[in-house]
Every structure is written in structure tokens, then in C-alpha cells.
Image (cartoon, grey):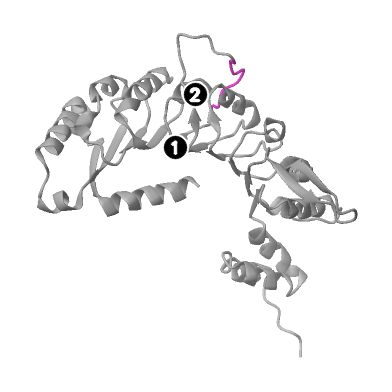
Amino acid sequence: MPRAQLPRELCDLIVDYAHTERATLATCALVCRAWVPASRFHLFARISLSDTDGYAAARLNDLLASPRTTIVPAVRRLDLLNALAQVQIRKPRTGRVQLKTLLDIVPRIAQLRHIHTLALSDLPFALLAAFPKVRTLHLAGVTAGPALLRLAACFPDLRQLALKRVHAIPYRSSAPAPETPTTTMEHLRGVTVRGSSIAFLGWLALLAPRTATLDLRDFCPSEVPYLAAYLCALAGPLERLELGLSPGTAVREFAWHEVAPSVGTETRLVVSFEVPEELGEEGDTEDTEDGEATLRAQFADLEKQGMLDIRRLSGVEYITVLLCATRTAC
């Protein structure tokens, strides 16, 4: 009696259902050769390296050095944390301890040219040019300033840029720029900023003057001039501007009249802010009502077109929104 054989497409579909179960995927890869590509596609979809585990980086480098390695097309996301930090690593033969950077330990990481999502905590520009297919870039803890201008040459097809807890270098339009980008990011559509000052936004206006969406969380009253200057510097109005006000700040504390002239008539403006639980149940305070009235008055045209969205969130709701936004950005 001939042995029953499932179609290849059906086997791949079965393996796809286990895409979040690494142990199951590893087992599937051992079933037969036909199941290896689909299992590998999910097993190596995301690789994370940090300075806390230099041996994992060394093992990855050995794997990439093998002429029989087949994982390169499967790696589509790379998280590289503290790539320039010194790491202690012991040689297996001599036992000597050496200090190397993470990039020195895994130099063959540049072979991963199919990466489309990259997360970094520093900017190793010598390596970044090896990933021209990156479309989504996450930066955390980096210094955001004129160095951002160098990203255009590294990521010509970048679509989304997320920055989290960065150290901002203010952009001064009156001062000559130390670096002028020879190219700009024409494809960059969205920028998100979490837990950071936005004083660096002027540099992004030079880098990507045609950005379509901007999403800011923890937006403070003192940051209004930076936002207004950024909107003026863009080549055209944003399609969507989302502002999550910093917890504990009231709507009336913001100088909305400085932002209003730079917001396009076709820009969807979303403003969300926290309302204390006890006030959310009993009703709005007078200050909140006055702040919202001022906001609506400054953006009257947007409200008439249904393009102004004001969201009052309770403390729990606000935290939930922040957590969801953070996970999306990461």
C-alpha cells in the first residue's frame, strides 16, 4: 500500500500555525527535510544580540561562517543592543579573557541582508550600510542630533522610524548645520517618539521633509515650540498628528495657538490626555472644559471637517494606551 503524502503547501500551513512556539518549530524541523524551510522561516525570523551574552554572538558568527548555513534569508528582524560596548569573552582553547565589542565578536552579521526591521541602542554606522532593505528602524537610548542625517545613506527605503528615550540635541535653524544630508529619506512615512524630548525634530525635518504621520507620547507644554518649528520645516502638512499629553498635564497648559498655524487643513489631529478616575466618573472639571474649548477653537476648521479627535482617558485607559503604543513601536 503506497504511503500517504501531504502536499507541501499543506505541511507549510501546519508549521505556520506554530509560529510562536519555538520548541514546536524546532521539533518540526527534525521531522523531515521538507519541513525545514517553513520551520526555519519562523525560528530565525528574529535574532536578538546584546553585550550581556557575548557567547551567543560568537556562536551566531560561527554559524554564519559555515559554508552550509541556510539561515540568512530567514532572518528578517535584528535587535542589536549595545553593539559598541566592551564585552568580556574567554577563548575556549587558551582560557584567556579578551575585551571586544559586540561587533568585533560577530563581524559576519553583515551577511544578514534580508533584514527589514532593525532595533538599535547605538549607531554603528560602519555596519548599518549592510542592511539596505530595512524598512522599520527602532532607536532606543541613542543621541538624536546631527548624526541622524547619516541614516539616509544607510537606509534608502526606510518607511517607519521609532525613537524611545533618546538623548535630544536641539536643532537651531539659525546655526549652520554641521552636516548636510546629500540624500533625504523620500519613503519615510511615519515617526513615533516615546519618553523623549522632541528638541531633535528639526534634524528629522532635514532628513525626511515629506513625513506623513507623527505620533508623540509624553508630550509636554515646554515642547510646543519644537513641534511648531518642525511642522513649519516640513515640505507639506502631515496626514496625521497624534499627541499623547504627558500624565499630570492639563490641556489648557499647552500653547495651542503656536501649533495651529502649522497644522494642515487636511491633517487628522488626535489629542489624548489622562483624566483622574474620580473626575472621569463625576464629570469634567472646569479647567478641563476650558482647555478643550480652547483646543476646539484653535482647530475649528479641523473639527468642522471631523478631523479633530479629542480623547479623554482614565488613568487605567491611558496606561493601557501607552503600553500598546510602546509594544507597537518595539
Select label 2 or label 1 by which is in front.
Answer: 2
Q: Nearer the viewer, residue 297 or 142?
A: 142
Residue 270 seen from this side? yes
Q: Amino acid at mark 1?
A: Thr
Q: Which residues are magenta?
A: 179-186
Return the residue at label 2: 169
The residue wearing badge 1 is 192
Q: Position of residue 140 (x, y in %)?
A: 53, 39
Q: Position of residue 274 (x, y in %)?
A: 25, 44
Residue occupying the point 26% across, 51% down:
315
- In this rendering, the answer to whether 199 lies above or below 58 is above
Q: In the image, 202: left or right of 291?
A: right
Look at the magenta stretch and give its main secondary structure. loop
| 176 sits left or right of 7 in the view | left
Q: Answer above or below: position of 207 versus 105.
A: above
Alpha-carbon span between mark 2 and mark 1:
17 Å
Q: Which mark is residue 98?
A: none
Taking depth in this image into account, of 297 and 196 the one nearest to the observer is 196
Callout 2: 10 Å neighbours few (<14), some, many (20+)?
Answer: some
Label 1: which secondary element: strand
Residue 11 percent location from the top left of the image: 65, 71
Q: What SS does tag 2 mark? A: loop
Callout 2 touching callout 1 (CB < 8 Å) = no
Q: Nearer the viewer, residue 205 or 237?
A: 205
**Amino acid found under the numbered disc labelled 2:** Ile
Residue 292 image-quadrant placement: top left
